[in-house]
Image (tube, grey):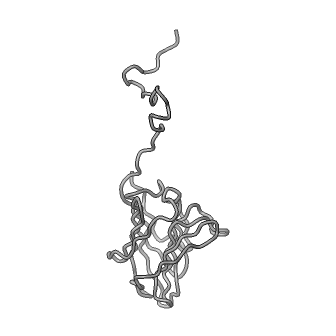
Amino acid sequence: MASPPLFNPVVPFINPIPGGMYPGRMIRVQGSTPPGAQRFAINFQCGPNTDPRDDIALHLNFRFVEMCVVRNHLTAMSWGVEETNGGMPINRGDTFEALVLCEPQSIKVALNGIHFCEFPHRVPYQRISHITVDGDVMIQFVGFEGAQPPPQQMYMADTAYGTYGAPPAYGAPGYGAPQGFY
């Protein structure tokens, strides 16, 4: 079941990511910046808190003065090593679209339909629960797209149950549907 998109949210913006982050999940952010924009950030966080801030699995910081998009992560209120290569592919005063795709080993980012970067997971993607946006930006659209999350594994590997194996499901051979009391 697809999650409904969000239209024209107020910035600063904090929202849960419906169903969380998983390989195949893509988040689309469309917005615009004012002509005098200095910077704005899109964060994929491990919770909703901003003061003190929860861990951030991916921090995209668009810095117009420095003409770069900083990528980083935050754990226990400590920033990691910044990545800044790639320049600044969007302009002040223009509209933009950021596509963020979760893959098993990294997060890929496309800006205005062109691949921009790949950010290897420094924080497990399973911890990502919220998206936040702040700074000199107006957001028109946030969409949650992509594959459905993988099914949750109900049981540990068969070896965890010794010689018994995993409990069979109702209706499986040797384990019929529940019976009434005698």
Q: Residue at x 42, y 27 (%)?
A: 168
Can you say whether 8 is above or below 127 in the image? below
Tell me if 37 is positioned left or right of 91 in this view. Answer: right
Front residue (pair 143, 153)? 153
Residue reaching furthest top? 182
Q: Residue 132 occupies which quadrant of the picture?
A: bottom right
Q: Residue at x 60, y 66 (%)?
A: 75
Query: What percent of the width, then of the height, locates residue 10?
Result: 54, 72
The percent position of residue 174, horizontal first and vertical second, equals 39, 19
105 and 145: which is toward the camera = 105
Question: Residue at (50%, 69%) from the top-left corner?
Answer: 58
Task: Work out whether residue 116 or residue 138 is closer to the camera in this orientation and state it.
Answer: 116
Residue 154, image x, y percentages = 47, 38
Residue lying farthest to the right in this orientation: 52
Relative to 64, say whether 102 is above or below.
Answer: above
Res. 94 image quadrant: bottom left
Task: State the residue lying farthest toward the left.
Answer: 113
Q: Residue at x 66, y 69 (%)?
A: 51
Q: Residue 143: give x, y in percent of width and height.
A: 41, 64
Number of numbered discs visible in the structure rendering: 0
- Vertical position of residue 107 compared to residue 87: above or below: above
